[in-house]
Image (cartoon, rainbow, N blue to C red):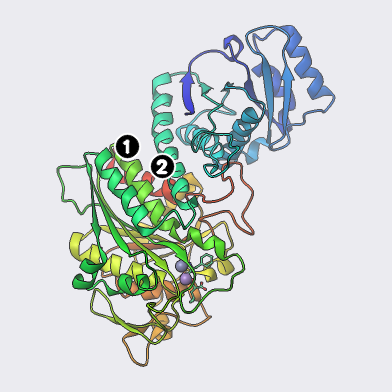
Amino acid sequence: MVKVVAEQIPASTKRTPLLVLGVFEDEVEGIRNQLDGINSMTVELVDRVIKEKEHTGSFGSICIVHCFTGPIQRIMLLGLGQRASLDNEKVRVLAGKASAKAMEINVTEYSIKPFTQLTKVLTEAICEGTCLSLYKFDQYQSQKNGESSYSSSLLTISLLVDGNREEWQSVLDTTRIIVDAVNFGRDLANLPPNECSPEYLARVALDLSSKHQRISTRIIERYEMESLGLNGIVAVGMGSNKPPKLVIIEYKGNENSSIAGPYLFVGKAVTFDTGGISIKPSDRMDEMKFDKSGGCDVIAIMSGLANLEVKANVIGIVPCVENMPSSSSYRPGDIVRMYNGKTVEVINTDAEGRLILADSIAYGIEKYNPNSIIDLATLTGACIVALGSNIAGALSNSPELFNKLRLISEKTNEKFWQLPLYTEFNEQIRSKFADIKNIGGRAGGSITAAIFLSNFVNETPWIHLDIAGTAWTQEGTWDKSYNPKGATGFGIRSLIRLVIAESGSR
Ligand code: BES
Ligand code: MN
Ligand code: ZN
């Protein structure tokens, strides 16, 4: 396991196989100030590399200089680009490049000097970039590099700080737990669909409750869903011989308030989405194993909150189904009576996510009366068309809640963009034979999907996050050191930090 520790020690006296130093492109000479106290031979070598423009400080470039003597074996010059354009996202990316390079050259530990005046957000970014980029999903590869989701070769990373060591260490510790939650979510979402069934996810959620006193997990089985009237989930699950599971995870971190407050998180977990009878084209259908990403995110968030011992009460609901074509599948033309009593005409069985989310949201509201609801779902291909593969769609009935999340996402850099929820869009999902239908035509596909969901939300403040483009690396994904191939765990960092901010703990 990787450890990130804050150390209050001058860089020149730290005994380390590798010292990482940032170099600004517009201040390359500034590297001199960072070499204070380091032996003259090493300084001379770094000087040469700079003078001969072997290293220019251009963003993300790396040059490794070996030192003949002294406690430092090597120096990594890491290009930071222009000083004025360095922000916390760039720091996150740079920290990720440094750790990936360190792993590549087989050092087991290294030290890193903060690139600029250290702040809380910057410390978080360094820790996130470092640990998120070391993630690798290689458990199915015979010749793997790591023993778990992390490389086993890198052990300790020291952040060389001035001032209060404990203060920075506690920021690092909190961030480490959040990063572990992200990598846990990635591990789940990356699982192949033959391994990861609805039952598998239910087992994972149950394991959380055995591990954590403050978590209790409940699984609603298909027969129970039938008698409760959770027919949207039942309908989507009918085509598969793997029965659907409704996973409910309660985290009680605050004894003094009702279990409901403050948040209800709902995550779509379609363990594989073939489209059902309205079957998808086979091209890249393998990627539909990632259709469980929203649900995996929610499971990981609950685990992270428990590990952090956040003083808040949060409910996670994860409807788990496999969407398959078979003689027992639901069909286009079916009319389903949903949990809240509304009837839905199924026009396309590939618009399954909204059916399972709608029931989950309606059930969550009735059962828990939450203060706020946020759902995460790989809901529409239209969202990728509208916003690309790096920005999630966000639709909300509450400017206040939306703004809270927006402020958090400016720090985490999990980007989303608002799409409108005008009630006029309801006309597009009006059905001839039922109350509403499950698709609204080509125009505004992500909006009509969210409008569908809005029919199952009451006045409770709610945000729907469409993570179809951002849940895994795909065509158009920006190359980032800290998002290795596969599931990204998009949303986990922001939602955990939102609960932390709201609860005032940590
Ligand atoms: N899981 C898909 C959405 C999706 C597609 C996410 C591609 C990421 C990449 C969802 O269940 C779906 O199939 N949506 C349909 C809706 C349509 C039938 C109205 C879509 O987007 O095509
Ligand atoms: Mn679908
Ligand atoms: Zn789907």
Note whether 1 is above or below 224 in the view shown: above
Relative side of 75 to 321, left or right = right
Residue for point 64% across, 59% down: 475
- Residue, disc 1: 307
- Hey, which residue is sitting farthest right in the picture? 52
Label 1 sits on a secondary structure element that is: helix
| Residue, disc 2 | 181
Q: Residue at x 44, y 53 (%)?
A: 195
Q: Earlier in the sequence, mark 1 or mark 2?
A: 2
Q: CA distance from mark 1 to mark 2?
A: 9 Å
Q: Is the residue marked 2 within 8 Å of ligand 1, measured from its CB?
A: no
Q: Quick check: 142 left or right of 38?
A: left
Depth check: give the residue in front, 422 or 462.
462
Disc 1 and disc 2 in contact, CB within 8 angstroms: yes
Q: Position of residue 450 (x, y in %)?
A: 41, 71
- The residue under label 2 is which amino acid type? Ala
| Residue at point 51%, 54% (across, down) | 415
Q: For the C terminus, give its image quadrant.
A: top left
Residue 382 seen anywhere in this rendered image of the structure:
yes
Residue type at the position of mark 1: Asn
Q: Position of residue 223 (x, y in %)?
A: 22, 68
Q: What label does residue 86 carry, if any?
A: none
Q: Is residue 238 left or right of residue 185?
A: left
Q: Is residue 130 above or below residue 226?
A: above
